[in-house]
Image: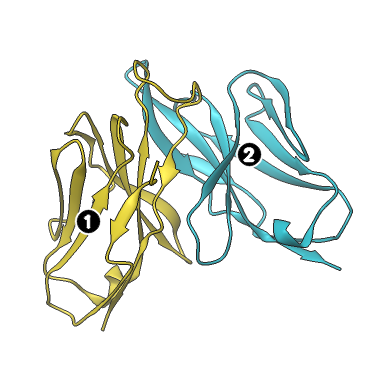
């Protein structure tokens, strides 16, 4: 089966660092995405990992361990505008080949407080 | 680029009525996806197309749902008859193909969504 787990909610303070974890158990794997979704808006792409290790992009970094089925999104120097839902998604594999199908977790709602 | 365009943005209808949601993907993108998002179930893939051909419709909940992509610039998702449990936000997304232009990540670009309420 397909299973992606994330914490439901997190709270952090402006200026601090927060780490949002994601664990997955999927029948196939061809990359992991993080999306940001503000309330009432569409998801927007944040990061992509297909190999083990850390990908850094400004204040945001994403880490992947394929052997552990684990990823995290690290947000540094938190700002109030970072209050949003963060969605972890795994790209599926079909018949041994890549697909473009994403399986999403239910998201982590992050609240940044002053 | 204009981004993915969806219409209508909001739809309120009564149970039993037919609902048609529309999507225009980003020009040049080979893939188009229809998602449904609810508080209880999160973001669920309903169906996706590659070069206008349906590839995976395993997420379509039942026969009341149907989707078409008659050409590369237009897709519809139809619910007939609609039920209150269909109330959700429906997103359309598109992404470039592996052989086309676009990001090497092949990330999906989402439209603004259609908020559907079935009374």
| Residue in the foreground of this view, choosing between A82 and A101 | A82
| Residue located at (36% from left, 25% from top) | A99
Question: Please, is residue B14 above or below residue A75 in the view?
Answer: below
Question: Please, is residue A29 above or below residue B57 in the view?
Answer: above
Residue A21 horizontal/vertical position (percent): 70, 43
Alpha-carbon span between mark 1 and mark 2? 34 Å
Instruction: Please give the letter of the chain rendered in cyan.
Output: A
**Quarter of the image that includes the C terminus of chain B:** bottom left
Q: Is B61 left, or right, of B71 in this rendering?
A: right
Pointer 1: what residue?
B22
Q: Is B18 left, or right, of B60 in this rendering?
A: left
Dot 1 alpha-carbon crowd within 10 angstroms: few under 14, some 14 to 19, many 20 or more: some
Disc 2 chain ID: A
| Residue located at (18% from left, 71% from top) | B82
Dot 2 alpha-carbon crowd within 10 angstroms: few under 14, some 14 to 19, many 20 or more: many
Give chain B's shade.
yellow
The answer to whether residue A1 shows anywhere in this view is no
Q: Is B87 left, or right, of B79 in this rendering?
A: right
Picture quadrant of residue B22: bottom left
The answer to whether residue B32 shows anywhere in this view is yes
Outermost residue toward the front?
A: B1
Question: Please, is residue B117 above or below residue A40 in the view?
Answer: below
Pointer 2: what residue?
A23
Which coloring applies here? by chain
Local secondary structure at mark 2: strand
Picture quadrant of residue B1: top left
């Amino acid at each position: 089966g397909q299973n992606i787990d994330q914490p439901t909610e997190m709270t952090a303070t402006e200026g601090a660092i927060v780490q949002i974890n994601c664990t997955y158990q999927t029948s196939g794997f061809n990359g992991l995405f993080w999306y940001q979704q503000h309330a009432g808006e569409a998801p927007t792409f944040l990061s992509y990992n297909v190999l083990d290790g850390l990908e850094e992009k400004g204040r945001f970094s994403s880490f992947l361990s394929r052997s552990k089925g684990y990823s995290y999104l690290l947000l540094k120097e938190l700002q109030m505008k970072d209050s949003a839902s963060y969605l972890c998604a795994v790209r599926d594999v079909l018949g041994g080949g890549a697909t473009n199908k994403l399986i999403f977790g239910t998201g982590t709602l992050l609240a940044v407080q002053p | 680029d204009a981004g993915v365009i969806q219409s209508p943005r909001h739809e309120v209808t009564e149970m039993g009525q037919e609902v048609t949601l529309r999507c225009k993907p980003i020009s040049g993108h080979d893939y188009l996806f229809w998602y449904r998002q609810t508080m209880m179930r999160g973001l669920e893939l309903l169906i996706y197309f590659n070069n206008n051909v349906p590839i995976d419709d395993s997420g379509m909940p039942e026969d009341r749902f149907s989707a078409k992509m008659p050409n590369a610039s237009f897709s519809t998702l139809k619910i007939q008859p609609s039920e209150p449990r269909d109330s959700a936000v429906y997103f359309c997304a598109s992404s470039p193909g592996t052989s086309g232009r676009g990001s090497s990540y092949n990330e999906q670009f989402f439209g603004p969504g259609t908020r559907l309420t079935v009374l």
